Amino acid sequence: MILVAPDKFKGSLSAAEAAAAMADGVRDACADAAVDVCPLADGGEGSGEILAAALGARRREVEALDALGRPRVAAWWLEAGTSTAIVEFAQIAPMVRGATVQDVLRATSYGVGQVLAAAAGAGARHVLLCCGGSGSVDGGAGCLQALGFEFIDRDGRRIDVPLGGEGLARVAGVQAPAAHVDVAIDVLCDVDNPLCGERGAAPVFAPQKGATAPEAVDALARNLTTWAGLAKRITGIRIADVAHGGAAGGVPAGLHAFTGARLLSGCEAIARAVRLEERMAAARLCLTGEGRLDAQTAGGKVVAGVARVARARGVPVVAFAGQVDGDAAVGEPLGLRAAIAISPAELDHASALARAAQLLRAAVGDYLRTVG
Protein backbone atom coordinates (compact mmCIF):
# COMPACT_ATOMS: atom_id res chain seq x y z
CA MET A 1 0.00 0.00 0.00
CA ILE A 2 1.26 3.46 -0.89
CA LEU A 3 -0.27 6.23 1.22
CA VAL A 4 -0.69 9.56 -0.58
CA ALA A 5 -1.14 12.32 2.02
CA PRO A 6 -0.42 15.86 0.78
CA ASP A 7 -1.53 19.32 1.79
CA LYS A 8 -2.70 21.83 -0.81
CA PHE A 9 -0.24 23.39 -3.26
CA LYS A 10 -1.29 26.96 -2.54
CA GLY A 11 -2.40 28.91 -5.58
CA SER A 12 -2.64 25.86 -7.81
CA LEU A 13 -4.03 22.65 -6.27
CA SER A 14 -6.32 21.82 -3.39
CA ALA A 15 -5.19 18.96 -1.16
CA ALA A 16 -7.69 16.66 -2.89
CA GLU A 17 -6.44 17.68 -6.34
CA ALA A 18 -2.81 17.22 -5.28
CA ALA A 19 -3.61 13.78 -3.84
CA ALA A 20 -5.37 12.75 -7.06
CA ALA A 21 -2.40 13.87 -9.19
CA MET A 22 0.03 11.98 -6.96
CA ALA A 23 -2.12 8.86 -7.08
CA ASP A 24 -2.14 9.06 -10.88
CA GLY A 25 1.66 9.29 -10.81
CA VAL A 26 1.86 6.17 -8.65
CA ARG A 27 -0.33 4.24 -11.09
CA ASP A 28 1.68 5.53 -14.07
CA ALA A 29 4.78 3.90 -12.58
CA CYS A 30 3.14 0.91 -10.87
CA ALA A 31 -0.14 0.06 -12.58
CA ASP A 32 -1.15 -2.53 -9.98
CA ALA A 33 -0.15 -0.53 -6.88
CA ALA A 34 -2.70 -0.18 -4.11
CA VAL A 35 -3.08 3.51 -3.25
CA ASP A 36 -4.71 5.09 -0.20
CA VAL A 37 -5.61 8.71 -1.00
CA CYS A 38 -5.65 10.89 2.13
CA PRO A 39 -5.75 14.68 1.56
CA LEU A 40 -4.58 16.65 4.59
CA ALA A 41 -4.48 20.20 5.92
CA ASP A 42 -2.85 22.11 8.76
CA GLY A 43 -5.64 24.44 9.85
CA GLY A 44 -5.24 26.73 6.86
CA GLU A 45 -7.16 26.94 3.61
CA GLY A 46 -9.05 23.75 2.78
CA SER A 47 -9.12 22.44 6.36
CA GLY A 48 -12.86 22.92 6.71
CA GLU A 49 -13.81 20.67 3.81
CA ILE A 50 -11.42 17.92 4.89
CA LEU A 51 -12.73 17.95 8.45
CA ALA A 52 -16.34 18.11 7.25
CA ALA A 53 -15.83 15.04 5.08
CA ALA A 54 -14.18 13.16 7.95
CA LEU A 55 -16.86 14.08 10.51
CA GLY A 56 -19.91 14.00 8.25
CA ALA A 57 -20.68 17.69 8.80
CA ARG A 58 -23.02 19.58 6.48
CA ARG A 59 -22.18 22.86 4.81
CA ARG A 60 -23.93 26.05 5.83
CA GLU A 61 -23.48 29.67 4.81
CA VAL A 62 -23.73 33.02 6.57
CA GLU A 63 -22.89 36.61 5.66
CA ALA A 64 -19.85 37.99 7.49
CA LEU A 65 -17.22 40.69 7.06
CA ASP A 66 -13.93 39.92 5.37
CA ALA A 67 -10.59 41.24 6.64
CA LEU A 68 -11.26 44.70 5.16
CA GLY A 69 -14.80 44.94 6.51
CA ARG A 70 -16.57 44.02 3.28
CA PRO A 71 -19.58 41.68 3.46
CA ARG A 72 -19.19 38.23 1.94
CA VAL A 73 -20.92 34.87 2.14
CA ALA A 74 -18.82 32.51 4.24
CA ALA A 75 -19.14 28.74 4.46
CA TRP A 76 -19.05 26.77 7.69
CA TRP A 77 -20.13 23.23 8.60
CA LEU A 78 -22.25 21.59 11.32
CA GLU A 79 -22.39 17.98 12.49
CA ALA A 80 -25.75 18.01 14.25
CA GLY A 81 -25.35 14.70 16.08
CA THR A 82 -22.44 15.98 18.18
CA SER A 83 -23.35 19.69 17.90
CA THR A 84 -19.88 20.26 16.42
CA ALA A 85 -19.27 23.18 14.07
CA ILE A 86 -16.30 23.67 11.78
CA VAL A 87 -15.28 27.24 11.00
CA GLU A 88 -12.40 28.06 8.66
CA PHE A 89 -10.72 31.47 8.94
CA ALA A 90 -9.67 31.38 5.29
CA GLN A 91 -13.33 31.09 4.25
CA ILE A 92 -14.11 34.37 6.01
CA ALA A 93 -11.19 36.81 6.21
CA PRO A 94 -8.28 35.42 4.19
CA MET A 95 -5.22 37.27 2.96
CA VAL A 96 -6.20 40.05 0.59
CA ARG A 97 -4.55 39.82 -2.81
CA GLY A 98 -2.55 42.99 -3.48
CA ALA A 99 -3.13 44.32 0.05
CA THR A 100 -1.38 47.59 0.92
CA VAL A 101 0.36 48.37 4.19
CA GLN A 102 -2.68 50.36 5.31
CA ASP A 103 -4.95 47.43 4.46
CA VAL A 104 -2.98 45.14 6.77
CA LEU A 105 -2.91 47.70 9.58
CA ARG A 106 -6.71 47.96 9.60
CA ALA A 107 -7.53 44.35 8.71
CA THR A 108 -9.80 42.67 11.25
CA SER A 109 -10.90 39.23 12.37
CA TYR A 110 -14.41 40.55 13.17
CA GLY A 111 -16.05 38.31 10.58
CA VAL A 112 -14.63 35.20 12.21
CA GLY A 113 -16.41 36.14 15.42
CA GLN A 114 -19.62 36.67 13.45
CA VAL A 115 -19.44 33.11 12.09
CA LEU A 116 -18.61 31.69 15.53
CA ALA A 117 -21.66 33.48 16.91
CA ALA A 118 -23.81 32.16 14.05
CA ALA A 119 -22.61 28.62 14.73
CA ALA A 120 -23.49 28.94 18.42
CA GLY A 121 -26.88 30.36 17.47
CA ALA A 122 -27.49 27.35 15.23
CA GLY A 123 -26.96 24.97 18.16
CA ALA A 124 -23.24 24.26 18.06
CA ARG A 125 -21.70 23.55 21.45
CA HIS A 126 -18.21 22.70 20.21
CA VAL A 127 -16.36 24.56 17.46
CA LEU A 128 -13.28 23.51 15.55
CA LEU A 129 -11.85 26.85 14.38
CA CYS A 130 -9.29 26.35 11.62
CA CYS A 131 -6.79 29.20 11.87
CA GLY A 132 -4.45 29.86 8.99
CA GLY A 133 -4.18 31.99 5.86
CA SER A 134 -5.58 35.07 7.59
CA GLY A 135 -5.46 38.64 6.33
CA SER A 136 -5.41 40.30 9.76
CA VAL A 137 -2.90 40.91 12.56
CA ASP A 138 -5.25 42.04 15.34
CA GLY A 139 -4.58 39.56 18.15
CA GLY A 140 -8.16 38.35 17.92
CA ALA A 141 -9.63 41.67 19.09
CA GLY A 142 -12.02 41.96 16.14
CA CYS A 143 -13.21 38.39 16.63
CA LEU A 144 -13.90 39.05 20.33
CA GLN A 145 -15.88 42.20 19.47
CA ALA A 146 -18.21 40.16 17.28
CA LEU A 147 -18.65 37.70 20.16
CA GLY A 148 -19.95 40.52 22.34
CA PHE A 149 -16.84 41.70 24.18
CA GLU A 150 -16.76 45.48 24.60
CA PHE A 151 -13.48 47.30 23.99
CA ILE A 152 -12.97 50.58 25.82
CA ASP A 153 -10.58 53.36 24.79
CA ARG A 154 -8.50 55.61 27.07
CA ASP A 155 -11.38 58.09 27.40
CA GLY A 156 -13.71 55.40 28.67
CA ARG A 157 -15.68 55.21 25.44
CA ARG A 158 -16.71 51.98 23.73
CA ILE A 159 -14.91 51.27 20.46
CA ASP A 160 -17.67 50.48 17.97
CA VAL A 161 -15.70 49.97 14.76
CA PRO A 162 -14.18 46.52 14.12
CA LEU A 163 -10.63 46.58 15.45
CA GLY A 164 -7.55 45.85 13.40
CA GLY A 165 -3.93 45.63 14.46
CA GLU A 166 -3.45 49.38 14.26
CA GLY A 167 -6.54 49.97 16.41
CA LEU A 168 -5.15 47.91 19.29
CA ALA A 169 -3.21 51.03 20.31
CA ARG A 170 -6.53 52.61 21.35
CA VAL A 171 -7.62 49.82 23.70
CA ALA A 172 -7.50 50.49 27.44
CA GLY A 173 -9.98 47.90 28.68
CA VAL A 174 -12.16 44.93 27.73
CA GLN A 175 -15.53 43.99 29.22
CA ALA A 176 -16.95 40.49 28.84
CA PRO A 177 -20.51 40.19 27.50
CA ALA A 178 -23.30 39.69 30.03
CA ALA A 179 -24.48 36.60 28.13
CA HIS A 180 -21.41 34.58 27.20
CA VAL A 181 -21.47 32.50 24.02
CA ASP A 182 -21.92 28.97 25.37
CA VAL A 183 -19.54 27.09 23.10
CA ALA A 184 -16.21 25.34 23.61
CA ILE A 185 -13.64 26.39 21.02
CA ASP A 186 -10.71 24.32 19.84
CA VAL A 187 -8.42 26.43 17.66
CA LEU A 188 -6.60 24.38 15.03
CA CYS A 189 -3.45 26.36 14.23
CA ASP A 190 -1.30 26.03 11.12
CA VAL A 191 1.90 27.19 12.86
CA ASP A 192 3.34 27.04 16.38
CA ASN A 193 4.64 30.63 16.43
CA PRO A 194 3.91 32.72 19.53
CA LEU A 195 2.07 36.03 19.49
CA CYS A 196 5.11 38.18 20.32
CA GLY A 197 8.87 38.13 19.89
CA GLU A 198 11.15 37.39 16.96
CA ARG A 199 8.91 34.52 15.78
CA GLY A 200 5.75 36.47 16.54
CA ALA A 201 2.75 37.18 14.35
CA ALA A 202 3.93 40.62 13.21
CA PRO A 203 7.57 40.12 12.17
CA VAL A 204 7.06 36.69 10.59
CA PHE A 205 3.66 36.95 8.93
CA ALA A 206 2.66 40.61 8.51
CA PRO A 207 5.04 41.11 5.54
CA GLN A 208 3.47 38.07 3.84
CA LYS A 209 0.05 39.72 4.17
CA GLY A 210 1.23 43.00 2.61
CA ALA A 211 2.77 44.99 5.50
CA THR A 212 6.11 45.35 3.77
CA ALA A 213 7.17 48.59 5.48
CA PRO A 214 9.41 47.92 8.52
CA GLU A 215 7.75 50.70 10.50
CA ALA A 216 4.33 49.07 9.99
CA VAL A 217 5.64 45.71 11.18
CA ASP A 218 7.19 47.39 14.22
CA ALA A 219 3.92 49.16 15.03
CA LEU A 220 1.95 45.91 14.81
CA ALA A 221 4.51 44.13 16.99
CA ARG A 222 4.33 46.87 19.65
CA ASN A 223 0.54 46.80 19.62
CA LEU A 224 0.43 43.02 20.01
CA THR A 225 2.86 43.22 22.94
CA THR A 226 0.68 45.87 24.59
CA TRP A 227 -2.41 43.75 23.88
CA ALA A 228 -0.77 40.72 25.50
CA GLY A 229 0.00 42.79 28.58
CA LEU A 230 -3.57 44.06 28.80
CA ALA A 231 -4.95 40.54 28.41
CA LYS A 232 -2.66 39.33 31.21
CA ARG A 233 -3.89 42.09 33.55
CA ILE A 234 -7.55 41.38 32.79
CA THR A 235 -7.59 37.57 32.62
CA GLY A 236 -4.40 36.53 34.41
CA ILE A 237 -3.46 34.46 31.35
CA ARG A 238 -0.08 34.95 29.69
CA ILE A 239 -0.47 34.89 25.90
CA ALA A 240 2.69 36.62 24.66
CA ASP A 241 4.64 33.40 24.22
CA VAL A 242 2.03 30.63 24.26
CA ALA A 243 2.62 28.09 21.48
CA HIS A 244 0.34 28.60 18.43
CA GLY A 245 -0.79 32.00 19.74
CA GLY A 246 0.63 33.85 16.72
CA ALA A 247 -1.28 31.89 14.09
CA ALA A 248 -3.86 33.79 12.03
CA GLY A 249 -2.61 37.17 13.20
CA GLY A 250 -2.93 36.28 16.88
CA VAL A 251 -6.58 35.19 16.98
CA PRO A 252 -5.71 31.99 18.89
CA ALA A 253 -3.99 34.02 21.63
CA GLY A 254 -6.94 36.38 22.06
CA LEU A 255 -9.49 33.57 22.17
CA HIS A 256 -7.35 31.60 24.60
CA ALA A 257 -7.22 34.50 27.05
CA PHE A 258 -10.83 35.66 26.91
CA THR A 259 -12.85 32.52 26.07
CA GLY A 260 -10.63 29.70 27.37
CA ALA A 261 -10.18 28.29 23.87
CA ARG A 262 -7.72 25.41 23.52
CA LEU A 263 -4.87 25.92 21.07
CA LEU A 264 -4.00 22.81 19.08
CA SER A 265 -1.79 21.82 16.19
CA GLY A 266 -4.09 21.87 13.18
CA CYS A 267 -2.04 19.24 11.43
CA GLU A 268 -2.28 16.83 14.37
CA ALA A 269 -6.00 17.41 14.93
CA ILE A 270 -6.85 16.84 11.27
CA ALA A 271 -4.57 13.79 11.16
CA ARG A 272 -6.59 12.30 14.02
CA ALA A 273 -9.87 13.07 12.28
CA VAL A 274 -8.81 11.24 9.08
CA ARG A 275 -7.16 8.34 11.03
CA LEU A 276 -3.70 9.00 9.62
CA GLU A 277 -1.86 6.76 12.09
CA GLU A 278 -4.09 3.79 11.31
CA ARG A 279 -3.69 4.33 7.59
CA MET A 280 0.07 4.84 7.93
CA ALA A 281 0.37 1.46 9.69
CA ALA A 282 -0.93 -0.24 6.53
CA ALA A 283 1.51 1.56 4.20
CA ARG A 284 4.92 0.55 2.89
CA LEU A 285 5.64 4.03 1.52
CA CYS A 286 4.13 7.47 2.12
CA LEU A 287 4.12 10.31 -0.39
CA THR A 288 3.32 13.78 0.90
CA GLY A 289 3.80 17.36 -0.24
CA GLU A 290 2.78 20.99 -0.25
CA GLY A 291 3.49 24.12 -2.23
CA ARG A 292 6.80 24.96 -0.59
CA LEU A 293 9.24 23.24 1.73
CA ASP A 294 11.34 25.70 3.72
CA ALA A 295 12.40 26.68 7.23
CA GLN A 296 8.75 27.07 8.29
CA THR A 297 7.84 23.50 7.33
CA ALA A 298 8.89 22.10 10.71
CA GLY A 299 6.68 24.61 12.58
CA GLY A 300 3.37 22.76 12.30
CA LYS A 301 3.05 22.14 8.56
CA VAL A 302 1.59 18.97 7.02
CA VAL A 303 4.84 17.51 5.68
CA ALA A 304 6.43 17.66 9.13
CA GLY A 305 3.37 16.10 10.74
CA VAL A 306 3.21 13.28 8.20
CA ALA A 307 6.93 12.62 8.61
CA ARG A 308 6.52 12.40 12.39
CA VAL A 309 3.71 9.82 12.14
CA ALA A 310 5.59 7.85 9.49
CA ARG A 311 8.79 7.81 11.53
CA ALA A 312 6.96 6.26 14.49
CA ARG A 313 5.69 3.51 12.18
CA GLY A 314 8.96 2.98 10.33
CA VAL A 315 7.44 4.04 7.00
CA PRO A 316 9.69 5.92 4.54
CA VAL A 317 8.40 9.31 3.39
CA VAL A 318 9.05 11.25 0.18
CA ALA A 319 7.87 14.86 -0.08
CA PHE A 320 7.09 16.74 -3.30
CA ALA A 321 6.76 20.51 -3.50
CA GLY A 322 6.59 23.33 -5.98
CA GLN A 323 9.74 24.73 -4.42
CA VAL A 324 12.27 23.22 -2.02
CA ASP A 325 14.62 25.58 -0.20
CA GLY A 326 17.83 23.60 0.30
CA ASP A 327 16.94 19.93 -0.13
CA ALA A 328 19.15 18.53 2.62
CA ALA A 329 18.51 21.37 5.07
CA VAL A 330 14.75 20.82 4.82
CA GLY A 331 14.55 17.07 4.33
CA GLU A 332 17.09 15.64 6.77
CA PRO A 333 15.75 17.14 10.02
CA LEU A 334 12.28 15.86 9.12
CA GLY A 335 13.54 12.39 8.33
CA LEU A 336 12.44 12.48 4.69
CA ARG A 337 13.86 9.93 2.30
CA ALA A 338 13.79 12.67 -0.35
CA ALA A 339 12.46 16.19 -0.89
CA ILE A 340 11.69 16.76 -4.57
CA ALA A 341 10.89 20.02 -6.36
CA ILE A 342 8.38 19.31 -9.13
CA SER A 343 9.00 22.46 -11.18
CA PRO A 344 11.96 22.60 -13.59
CA ALA A 345 14.27 25.55 -12.95
CA GLU A 346 13.68 26.94 -16.43
CA LEU A 347 9.89 27.07 -16.02
CA ASP A 348 8.46 30.44 -14.98
CA HIS A 349 6.23 30.67 -11.91
CA ALA A 350 2.94 31.29 -13.74
CA SER A 351 3.49 28.31 -16.03
CA ALA A 352 4.41 26.10 -13.08
CA LEU A 353 1.17 27.02 -11.29
CA ALA A 354 -0.90 26.33 -14.41
CA ARG A 355 0.73 22.93 -14.92
CA ALA A 356 0.99 21.92 -11.27
CA ALA A 357 -1.11 18.76 -11.53
CA GLN A 358 0.81 17.55 -14.58
CA LEU A 359 4.18 18.35 -13.00
CA LEU A 360 3.27 16.65 -9.72
CA ARG A 361 2.01 13.53 -11.46
CA ALA A 362 5.16 13.32 -13.57
CA ALA A 363 7.48 13.87 -10.60
CA VAL A 364 5.85 11.07 -8.59
CA GLY A 365 5.98 8.68 -11.53
CA ASP A 366 9.61 9.53 -12.31
CA TYR A 367 10.66 9.00 -8.69
CA LEU A 368 8.97 5.61 -8.36
CA ARG A 369 10.40 4.39 -11.67
CA THR A 370 13.87 5.49 -10.53
CA VAL A 371 13.77 3.66 -7.19
CA GLY A 372 11.97 0.65 -8.61
Image (cartoon, grey):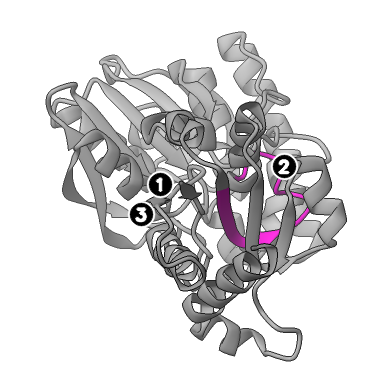
The numbered mark, 1 or 3, whose residue comes first in the sequence reads 1
Q: Is residue 238 left or right of residue 306?
A: right
Q: Is the residue marked by circle 3 packed among few (<14), some (14-19), or many (20+) residues within 10 Å? A: many
Instruction: Give the vertical position of 273 relative to 203 (above or below).
Output: above
The residue labelled by disc 3 is 91
Judged left or right of residue 108, residue 48 is: left
Q: Which mark is residue 298?
A: 2
Q: Please identify, in this view, whether the residue under mark 2 or under mark 3 is nearer the observer.
A: 2
Query: Of tags 1 and 3, which is closer to the observer?
Result: 1
Which segment did they paint magenta?
Answer: 286-301
Q: CA distance from mark 2 to mark 3?
A: 25 Å
Q: Disc 1 marks which residue?
A: 47
Look at the numbered discs 1 and 3 and tell me whether their residues touch, using CB distance below 8 Å: no
Is 287 one of the magenta-colored residues? yes
Q: Considering only order in the chain, which callout, 3 or 2, is on the residue closer to the N terminus?
A: 3
User: 268 left or right of 37?
Assistant: right
Q: Give the number of the disc on residue 61.
A: none
Q: Which of the 4 image quarters holds residue 334?
A: top right
Quadrant position of residue 125: top left
Mark 1 nearby-residue class (10 Å; few <14, some 14–19, many ≥20): many
